[in-house]
């Protein structure tokens, strides 16, 4: 499980490690874009979101917005949080569709309870296992993170929400309960509202002890679930996904275990200029006519007002005085 070579977490705090040079890799390196997009696609698959409506998702450690781009491509709304200003600047330069927030996930997530339908994270959680300051205690930072994550995925129901409409069967159940059973009724209603809320966190654990530390703090915060390992027999293609459930316990998905062509090792190659972002699954170039038409169609499905398509759709405007 240990990673060969120097791990990024050993190179210093993430806000310093991910500087402008590192951010440039996530914008210009086509291989890195492809890998990040594939992991985001797999994380979204493991969320098991409803297919008939868009969802509001949280992307933790969003970086330059590569994973968020795939969420937008699938028709979802999202908010990204990251500790690196350089990575967020790169995301703004790419004109992503999600909202961005600068923050440290180890200090908690600054959102109201029940704000999101789900959460993904790509290659971020393992950073909490490193102490970059004397005041940093990995176990406490992990617990603070998972506690706040549980909160933003769970809408807690209590008697203050008297105007909330519940199904008839649940109303009868709550009315039939005595005052001593009120708490259990509230918990039952809470679980009904958040059924299926999940978080899928892709991570690179340094060793089994680190993975155990992460899962222990997640369980302590109230989550259930487990670890999904894709391609466990592959050296470079093996990926770990921590699947967390904030509602009732459910099955943990099985990892992929087919023959996969291992990712090529080697140094990153860069172009002299910025290359167009391509969606790995479709190969659609951003800002092209096909990309514009797909984006407009997606917004129509979301119920937004969209101007009709014409022969001029997707064309570049001429420079005007």
Image (spheres, helix red, strand yellow):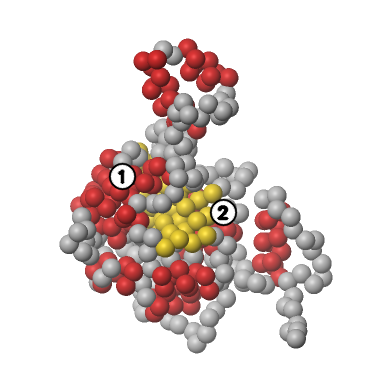
Along the line of sight, the residue nearer the viewer: 232 or 310: 310
> Residue 58 appears at what percent x and percent y?
47, 52
Q: Please report the residue visible at 43 percent of the width from the left and 66 percent of the height from the top.
A: 63
Q: Is residue 70 visible?
A: no
Q: Is residue 233 above or below residue 268?
A: above
Give the secondary structure at mark 1: helix
Where does label 2 land, which residue? 77
Q: CA distance from mark 1 to mark 2?
A: 25 Å
In the picture as drawn, the residue positioned furthest to the front comes out as: 160
> Which residue, given by chain and number where applicable, does mark 1 sit on?
218
Mark 1 Cα within 10 Å, few/some/many (few <14, many 20+)?
A: many
Question: Residue 152, how many percent across, how many down?
Answer: 43, 44
> Between 261 and 59, which is closer to the camera in this rendering?
59
In the image, 149 versus 253, the foreground residue is 149
Q: For the residue labelled by badge 2, is the local secondary structure a helix, a strand or a loop?
A: strand
Residue drawn at 77 percent across, 61 percent down: 307
Asked if one can make out residue 120 in the rendered structure from this viewpoint, the answer is: yes
- Marks 2 and 1: in contact by CB < 8 Å? no
For marks 1 and 2, the one nearer the N-term is 2
Q: Position of residue 47 (x, y in %)?
A: 47, 46
Image label count: 2
Residue 122 placement (x, y as % from top left): 41, 59
- The quadrant of the image that shows the N terminus is bottom left
Q: Is the C terminus in the top left, top right, bottom left or bottom right quadrant?
A: bottom right
> Residue at 47% across / 12% down in the picture?
176
């Amino acid at each position: 499980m240990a990673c060969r070579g120097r791990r990024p977490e050993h190179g210093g705090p993430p806000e310093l490690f991910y500087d402008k040079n590192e951010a440039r890799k996530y914008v210009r390196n086509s291989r890195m874009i492809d890998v990040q997009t594939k992991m985001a696609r797999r994380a979204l698959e493991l969320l098991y979101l409803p297919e008939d409506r868009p969802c509001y998702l949280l992307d933790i450690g969003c970086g330059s917005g590569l994973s968020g781009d795939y969420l937008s491509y699938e028709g979802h709304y999202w908010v990204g949080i990251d500790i690196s200003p350089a990575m967020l600047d790169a995301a703004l330069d790419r004109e992503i569709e999600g909202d961005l927030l600068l923050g440290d996930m180890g200090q908690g997530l600054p959102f109201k309870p029940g704000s999101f339908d789900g959460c993904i994270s790509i290659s971020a959680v393992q950073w909490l296992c490193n102490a970059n300051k004397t005041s940093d205690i990995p176990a406490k930072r992990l617990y603070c993170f998972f506690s706040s994550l549980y909160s933003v995925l769970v809408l807690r129901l209590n008697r203050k929400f008297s105007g909330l409409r519940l199904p008839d069967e649940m109303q009868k159940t709550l009315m039939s309960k005595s005052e001593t059973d009120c708490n259990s009724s509230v918990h039952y209603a809470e679980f009904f509202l958040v059924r299926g809320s999940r978080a899928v966190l892709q991570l690179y654990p340094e060793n089994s002890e680190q993975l155990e530390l992460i899962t222990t703090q997640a369980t302590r915060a109230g989550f259930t679930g487990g670890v999904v390992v894709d391609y466990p027999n592959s050296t470079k293609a093996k990926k770990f996904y921590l699947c967390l459930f904030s509602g009732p316990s459910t099955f943990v998905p099985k990892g992929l275990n087919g023959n996969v062509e291992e990712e090529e090792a080697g140094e990153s190659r860069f172009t002299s200029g910025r290359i167009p972002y391509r969606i790995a699954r479709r190969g659609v170039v951003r800002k092209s006519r096909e990309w514009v038409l797909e984006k407009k169609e997606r917004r129509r499905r979301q119920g937004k007002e969209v101007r009709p398509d014409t022969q001029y759709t997707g064309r570049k405007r001429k420079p005007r005085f």
